[in-house]
Amino acid sequence: MPEKTLAPEANPAPEAAAPAQPNSGQNKARSLGQDAWRELRASPLFWISAVLLVLFILMAIAPSLFTSGDPRHADLRGHYLAPPSWSHVFQDDWFGYNGQGQSVYARTVYGARASIIVGVCVTLAVTVIGGFFGMLAGYFGGWLDALLSRITDIFFGIPLLLGALVMLQAFAHRTVWTVVLGLTVFGWMQIARVMRGAVITQKQADFVTAARALGAGTGRILFRHILPNAIGPVIVVSTIALGGYISTEATLSYLGIGLQDPVISWGVDISAAQTTLRDAPHVLLVPATFLSLTVLAFILLGDAVRDALDPKLR
Amino acid sequence: MGRFVARRLLQMIPVFIGTTLLIFLMVYSLPGDPIKALFGSKAADPATVARLRHQYGLDKPLLTQYWDYLTGLFKGDFGQSFTGRPVADLMSDAFPVTIRLALLSFAIEVVLGVSLGMLTGLKRGKLVDQLVLILTLVVVSIPVFVIGFLTQFTLGMKWKLITPTVQDSMNVGQLFVPAMVLAALSLAYVTRLTRTTVVENLRADFMRTAVAKGLPRRRVLGVHLMRNSLIPVVTFLGTDLGMLMGGAIVTEGIFNVQGVGNTLFKSIQTSEGPTVVGIVTVLVLVYLVSSLVVDLLYAVLDPRIRYA
C-alpha cells in the first residue's frame, strides 16, 4: 500500500478498480461520515426519497410555488364536492373540491407545512432529549442508569398515541407546538434506549481508554469521542421515526384531539373528508396519498442511511 | 429460573406504580371539571357539587387520591365512573371484545408475518421478495386510519362484501376485517424482521453444518433456521400484544367495535378520569406481563441463554 507514488502523476490512466475520488488523487483516510455519504450517493432509494423530501419541504416552506389558489377560499355553490379534473395539472381544480367547496389541491399543498413542522420538531426534540438521557445512562451506569432506565420503562408502558391523546385533551386550543410537546413527552424513550446501547458498546473501545489515558475530561470523551461513533444508529432510528410522528399527528388530528381547524393539515382534512367518503373519495384520497408519500420518503431515507452506516452489509 | 422470575416481578412493581401514577396525574390535573360537566348547561348547585366531589374523593390531595386508588386496586376495586357505573363493570363489557380482536390480529400477524418473512428470506432477490418488500413499505407508510377507511370503503361500500361497521362486536367472523386492519402495520414489521434474520442466519455456520450432516430440508428450515430466526421476532411480538390492545382506538372507532379502544376514547373525550385510569392500568399490566413472557421465551428458543 505505501508504494504508489506513481498514481497522482499518472492521472489520466483510468483505474477501474480504484474508488473514484473526484478532487484529490490520493487515498486519504475517510471519516465514517464521508464513507457513509459515498455509499448513500450510490443508492437509488436514497435519491428517490431525497427528491420526494425536497419537494415536500419546498411545499412546506413556499406553498405558493405550487399553487396560486387560496386554501381557505370556499365556493360552496360552484364547487361542492366537484370531482378532480386530472388534465388540469397544477390548477385549483386538479384534485377537485371538498365538501366546503375548497380546492383540494390548494389545501393539500398548504397542509404540508403543519405535518413537516411537527415531524421535524418532534424528531429534533426527541433526539436531543432521548440522546442525552441515553448517553448519561450508558456512560455513567450504576444507580443513574438504573434510575433513568426505570423512567424509560415507565414511559414505555404508555403507547405514544394514548399518552398524547390524554395529554392533548387538556389543551382547549391546540397549535402545532402543543402537538409537538405531546408527541415529544411520549416519544423520547426509543432513542434513549438505542443511544444507551450504542454508548455502552463504544465506551469499552480502545480509543476511549486512550483518550482517558491522555487526560481527556468526561465532557470531551463523551462529545468528541463517544458521540460521533454512537450517533449512527440514533440517526437511523430517528429518521424512520420521523415518518411515524407525521403519521401520529395525522391520527391525532383525525381523532379530533390534534390540530384544529384554522390550521390546515392533512390529518384535519382527512378527518373532515370521512363524512363525504361515499360520494367523493378523492377528498380523502389526495391528502392521504401525500401523507403516505411523506412517511414513505422518510422510511426509505432511514433505510438508505442504515445501509450506508452499517459496515456489515458491505 | 425461579430467582430470575422473582427479580423480574420485583422490577415490574416500580414501573407499574410509575406508569399508573403518570397517567393518574395527567388525567386528574387536566383542566375542565368533570363534576360540573355532569350538570350540562344548567348551573351547578354548589352543595351537590361539593357532595359529589367528596363522594369521588376529588376534594383530597392528588397523591392521597392515588394512594386510595392503588389500595382499592389490590382489593379488585377499580372505582366508579362519574356516571355511577363501576369501572370494573364497564371493563368487563369492553375487554372480551378487544381481547378477541387483539388475539385475532396477533394470530394473523404471527402466521402470515412469519411465513411471508421466511418465504422472502429464502427467495431473497427474487420477484416474490421484491413484491412483498414493496408491499410492506406501502403498508407501513399508510396511516392505520387511512387503511381502515379504504378497507371500509372498498369492501363495505363498493363491493358490499362486509357491513361497513361491525354489527355484533362479539362475533369473531365480523371482527376479521377490523383485525386485519389492526394487524397490518405489525404484520409488515414482522415480515421485514423475519426476512432480515432469516437472510442473516442462512449464512451462519450452523446452517452449513446442518445441511452437511445430510438433514432433510424440512428439518434444516423448520428447526435450525426457524428457531434461531424467531428470537428477535418474539421480542417484537411480545411488546406488540399490549400495543394492539391500546392501538385499537383508531380501528375500533372506524368499524364501531364496542371494545376497550372505543370506551377509552369516549372516556378521554368526556374527562371520565376513573375509566381512563382503570383501562390504562389493565393495559399496562398486559404490557408488563407480555414482556416478562418474552424474556422467559428466550430461554426456550435459545438454550445458550441461562437465567441465574
Image (cartoon, coloured by chain):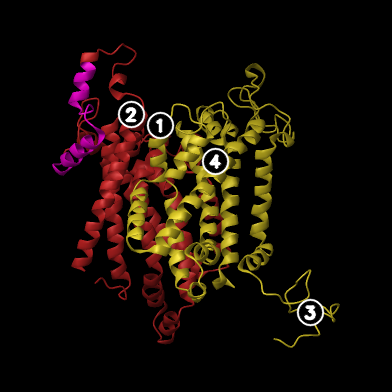
Chain colours: A yellow, B red
Which residue matches tag 3?
A15
- Residue A67 is covered by the magenta coloring: no
Image point (25%, 47%), residue name: B17
Amino acid type of the residue tagged 1 in the rendering: Gln
**Contact, CB < 8 Å: mark 2 with mark 1?**
yes
Chain containing mark 2: B
Image point (40%, 55%), residue name: B109
Give the Cα separation between the discs numbered 2 and 4: 26 Å
Give the Cα separation between the discs numbered 1 and 4: 18 Å
Horizontal and vertical percent position of residue B239: 35, 55
Nearer to us in this view, A203 or B83? A203
Going by the image, does B57 lie left or right of A106?
left
Amino acid type of the residue tagged 3 in the rendering: Glu
Residue B251 appears in the picture as rendered: no
Say which mark, if any, is on residue A118.
4
Chain containing mark 3: A
Amino acid type of the residue tagged 2 in the rendering: Ser
> Do marks 1 and 4 share a subunit?
yes
B148 in relation to A236, above or below? above
Image point (54%, 57%), residue name: A235
| SS majority, magenta | helix
